[in-house]
Image: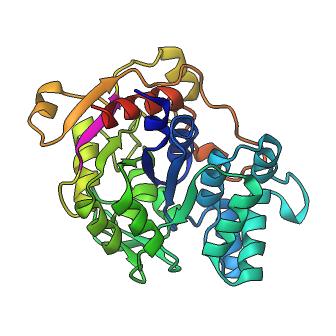
Amino acid sequence: MANDEITGVKIVVIGGGTGSFTLLQGVKRYAKHVTALVNMADDGGSTGQLRDELGVLPPGDVRQCLVALSDSPKVRDLFNYRFDEGSLKGHAFGNLFLTALEKMTGSFGEAVELAGRVLNIEGRVEPVTLSDVTLCVEGVDGRPVKGQFTIAHQEIAKRPKIWLEPTAVANPAAVRAILRADLVVVAPGNLYGSLAPVLVIDGIRRALHETRAKCVYVCNLVTKPGPTDGFTVKDFASEIERLAGGEFLDYVVFNNDEPSPELMEKYAHGGELVVKYDLNELRRQHYEFRGVPILAKQAWTGAQASDPIASARSFIRHDSDAVARQLMRLYFA
């Protein structure tokens, strides 16, 4: 395939957090037209404090996606730098920068665009909504559990009802990106904390069902204790489609490379287990699937001691280049 054929592909990556960060680092090497659509429900750590104290929209996941698409190493490091003492302890510089831009311009969308220029990003980052929303999930007792950070630390129902309060209005730029895309990729990530807040927005749902793009889900590497205990690849994909209101996936990509016992023992959080797959079960689904070795051989070690939620971050990650190359193969299949 010609190089200009590859770089001309319009790719949309949906999610937020470390899953999107990893995928974006890979796909930007192969395509110039990359758009990251970011969930806006984050309310933990530095982001949560800024939301509470200043009434701004959540900058954390947006910052990670901006940094992933940046071609300016020193500025990338600056945006990810976290203060480790004083009243700013735990805050990432990039979160403060986006917050200041939003307060100055009165528009979070404009703040993201300006930050993209400073970071010299290749592509775009779009919030999926500009509404100030709270993530709500059905608890084990049927009562609502509210707030992404709270949800991550409480028991919730299996395959729960999920909604945003107030009802989110889809960002028109995010909808346009999906409708104009050649390839739409749902990134791996926290199923109910990072992906659900995107997929339950009506305008995003409609776009996913209307787009002519090939739609791909890159499955998580490990289950999380509680909500996704025992989930297989098929279970994850089924939940993605349930949250999005119906079938829309064309492909599901998953890792078939077994991590070493040493990697799991040293870096997996308690209760995290490798996501299993049943090929016979997958053959009965409406989408095609690809089981490929896309596990990073080295655990991620980029957390700063000053990161207030570092202990919750996953250290077992996808190989960004291996995933990107697989996505390119699917597009040209």
Residue 11 horizontal/vertical position (percent): 43, 48
In-image side of 246 versus 312 (left or right) = left
- Residue at 46% across / 44% down in the picture? 8
Residue 317 horizontal/vertical position (percent): 52, 32
The N terminus lies in quadrant:
top left
Which segment is the magenta one? 249-254
Nearer-the-camera pick, 305 or 31: 31
Q: Is residue 203 above or below residue 296?
A: below
Residue 83: which quarter of the image? Answer: bottom right
- Residue at 22% across / 39% down in the picture? 234
Q: Is residue 137 magenta?
A: no
- Residue at 77% across / 58% down in the picture? 118
Q: Is residue 227 visible?
A: yes
Residue 66 horizontal/vertical position (percent): 64, 54
Q: Is residue 153 visible?
A: no
Residue 216: which quarter of the image? Answer: top left
Q: Is residue 133 above or below residue 15?
A: below
Nearer-the-camera pick, 228 or 196: 196
Q: Is residue 169 above or below residue 2?
A: below
Nearer-the-camera pick, 246 or 107: 107
**Secondary structure, magenta segment, majority class:** strand
